[in-house]
Image (spheres, rainbow, N blue to C red):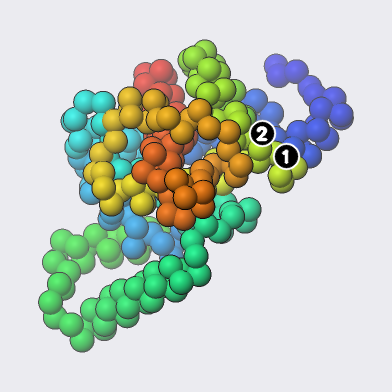
């Protein structure tokens, strides 16, 4: 039986954002890795982003559970010691697209860059709407794609429920609690945390008065990784782990200044940090749990 916590213990973890007991953390993580991969995005984002995620897996099945989806990406990308930046971007989008994760995000893009990107996004949305209205014949969906979309629409209510009750609780889990749970499978996780996370987590806590969540790290990291993906299709684990920027003391949590001393555009090296943060939180961790469980 799990030891009961004192009132002071409970109040302290609530204050810092670590309100779950170890059993609650375990339940949250295990429920997440068993969720269908189709549930990782909310309804309005699912049709747009899910195909980009599934193309990295050997099996195009949105009801495949998340942990097995990750193993399927290894089958689809057999290169040793490398991982697709595009795959990591769409995994990070779980947090980046979640409004709750971006609540404490510090903007780094200049307003003129944002305007250009918003205009491009609007143009793409209008083009897509025209296709769906039938005003553009080119690029029409194949019968197989139509059947896939209709099946997804039928299952959307179930996926929405799983997103709310299984995915969002995982994204709201504190990084500290998650790391403590993972350390039960592999003691070296504590060393990894100290080197790759501790300084940023502590800076976040000093700025916001609460510990950082998984979703908030994904939100902070995705933008830098998108910039890196323009020059690198894959990143090696050694590249990520040995990036020189790990030695810098951050002045913003989970962001780094470029060579000009500003936050935009992110350096390629920061993209390697971002890749590692995303890889560790939503790829390595869930994969390790599944393999250690033997399921």
Residue at position x 85%, y 25% in the image: 6
Left or right position of 232 against 268: left
Spatial separation of the CA atoms under disc 2 and disc 1: 6 Å
Choose between 267 and 160: the one closer to the eye. 267
Residue at position x 19%, y 62% in the image: 145
Name the quadrant containing residue 11: top right
Quadrant showing the N terminus: top right
Q: Indicate whether 56 appears above or below 24.
A: below
Q: Position of residue 52 (x, y in %)?
A: 28, 54
Which type of secondary structure does the marked residue at label 1 adopt? helix
Left or right position of 156 against 85: right
Evaluate whether residue 45 shows in this view: yes
Name the quadrant containing residue 268: top left
Evaluate whether residue 100 shows in this view: no
Choose between 155 and 167: the one closer to the eye. 167
Left or right position of 139 against 56: left
Which type of secondary structure does the marked residue at label 2 adopt? helix
Q: Position of residue 256 (x, y in %)?
A: 51, 43
Labels 2 & 1 near each other (Cβ < 8 A):
yes
Residue at position x 61%, y 31% in the image: 199
> What crowding class fits label 1: few (fewer than 14 Cα within 10 Å), some (14-19), or many (20 or more)?
few
Q: Position of residue 106 (x, y in %)?
A: 59, 55
Residue farthest top in this picture: 187
| Pointer 2 residue | 202
Q: Indicate whether 139 appears above or below 264.
A: below
What's the mark number on residue 206?
1
Residue farthest bottom in this picture: 135
């Amino acid at each position: 039986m799990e030891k009961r916590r004192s009132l002071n213990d409970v109040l302290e973890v609530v204050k810092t954002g670590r309100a779950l007991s170890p059993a609650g953390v375990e339940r949250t993580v295990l429920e997440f890795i068993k969720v269908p991969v189709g549930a990782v995005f909310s309804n309005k984002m699912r049709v747009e982003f899910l195909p980009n995620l599934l193309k990295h897996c050997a099996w195009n099945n949105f009801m495949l559970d998340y942990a097995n989806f990750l193993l399927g990406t290894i089958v689809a990308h057999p290169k040793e010691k490398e991982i697709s930046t595009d795959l990591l971007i769409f995994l990070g989008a779980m947090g980046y697209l979640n409004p709750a994760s971006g609540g404490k995000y510090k903007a780094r893009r200049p307003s003129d860059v944002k305007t250009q990107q918003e205009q491009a996004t609007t143009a793409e949305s209008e083009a897509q709407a025209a296709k769906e209205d039938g005003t553009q014949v080119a690029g029409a969906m194949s019968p197989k794609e139509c059947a896939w979309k209709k099946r997804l629409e039928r299952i959307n209510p179930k996926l929405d429920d799983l997103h709310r009750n299984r995915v969002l609780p995982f994204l709201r889990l504190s990084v500290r609690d998650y790391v403590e749970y993972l350390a039960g499978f592999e003691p070296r996780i504590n060393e990894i945390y100290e080197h790759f996370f501790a300084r940023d987590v502590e800076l976040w806590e000093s700025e916001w008065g609460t510990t950082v969540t998984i979703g908030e790290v994904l939100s902070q990291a995705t933008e830098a990784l998108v910039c890196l993906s323009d020059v690198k299709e894959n990143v090696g684990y050694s590249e990520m782990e040995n990036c020189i920027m790990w030695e810098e003391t951050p002045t913003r949590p989970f962001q780094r200044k470029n060579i000009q001393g500003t936050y935009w555009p992110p350096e390629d090296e920061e993209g390697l940090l971002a890749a590692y943060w995303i890889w560790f939180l939503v790829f390595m961790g869930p994969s390790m749990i599944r393999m250690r469980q033997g399921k």
